[in-house]
Image (cartoon, helix red, strand yellow):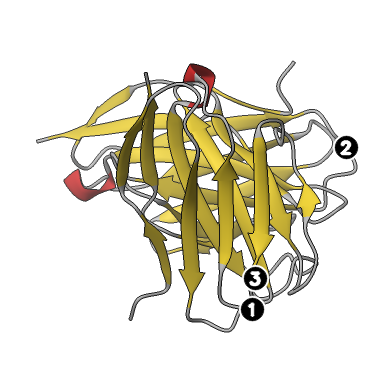
Amino acid sequence: RKEVEQDPGPFNVPEGATVAFNCTYSNSASQSFFWYRQDCRKEPKLLMSVYSSGNEDGRFTAQLNRASQYISLLIRDSKLSDSATYLCVRMDSSYKLIFGSGTRLLVRP
Amino acid sequence: NAGVTQTPKFQVLKTGQSMTLQCAQDMNHNSMYWYRQDPGMGLRLIYYSASEGTTDKGEVPNGYNVSRLNKREFSLRLESAAPSQTSVYFCASSERTADPNQPQHFGDGTRLSIL
């Protein structure tokens, strides 16, 4: 079983839609979590950290559920520019990053 | 505004050839990392260097060596390339390994094909 699992998608949504991705992790000792965004043939870039209390950054909301060992990313009012692959990432007890394989989002006009 | 610079961006090798991937960062970061990314696998850590003068194995170190030349530079060497090492390689850096609030910054990647 992968340490961080994501639905690969693609999620194909119209502009303006709300879309949510979930990610599950297998190591309950994980300390910190992040969402990275990766555009096609580009490097990953940090989108946002994920806090236990939930956090919001504009149209993006991240949630962490430690009891069920999953994190989520909600994107409201999707834009064409949101089309990308979203990587779920956990930091292990040695402070190394463990990446999921990504969820692909396509936003259509 | 360079950030993390990787060279080369593309490379084709024959099986058994050797090569070194170069990485340099200008953000004065202490920690540097090498990952490989394969379809459907996500990024996997090959080696990392928590600080100048130290290196440690990651998840998939076999077939690779690294050198932390100085604080800025961290190179990855393939001594005898194999087709299984065909991948996209990313170098990253961060202020400190043990700080969850310090994101890793990535280079553009090196696309390596081994025939």
Residue B30 in view, yes or no = yes
Name the residue at 49% across, 34% down. B37
- Could you tell me which quadrant the C terminus of chain A lies in? top left
Chain letter behind tag 1: B
The residue singled out by tag 2 in the image is A28
Q: Residues within 10 Å of mark 2 (few under 14, many from 20)?
A: few
Residue type indicated by callout 2? Ser
Residue A31 as seen in the image, left or right of residue B73:
right
Residue type indicated by callout 1? Lys
Q: Nearer the viewer, residue B9 or A17?
A: B9
Q: Nearer the viewer, residue A36 or B9?
A: B9
The residue singled out by tag 1 in the image is B71
Task: Measure how far apart labels 3 and 2 are at the Cα level.
Answer: 21 Å
Q: Kindly indicate whether the residues beneath marks 3 and 1 are on one polypeptide chain.
A: yes
Q: Are marks 1 and 2 in contact (CB under 8 Å)?
A: no
Residue B102 image label: 3
Can you name the residue that lies furthest to the front here? B17
**Closer to the N terminus: mark 3 or mark 1?**
1
Q: Residues within 10 Å of mark 1 (few under 14, many from 20)?
A: some
Q: Kindly indicate whether the residues beneath marks 3 and 2 are on one polypeptide chain.
A: no
Residue type indicated by callout 3? Gln
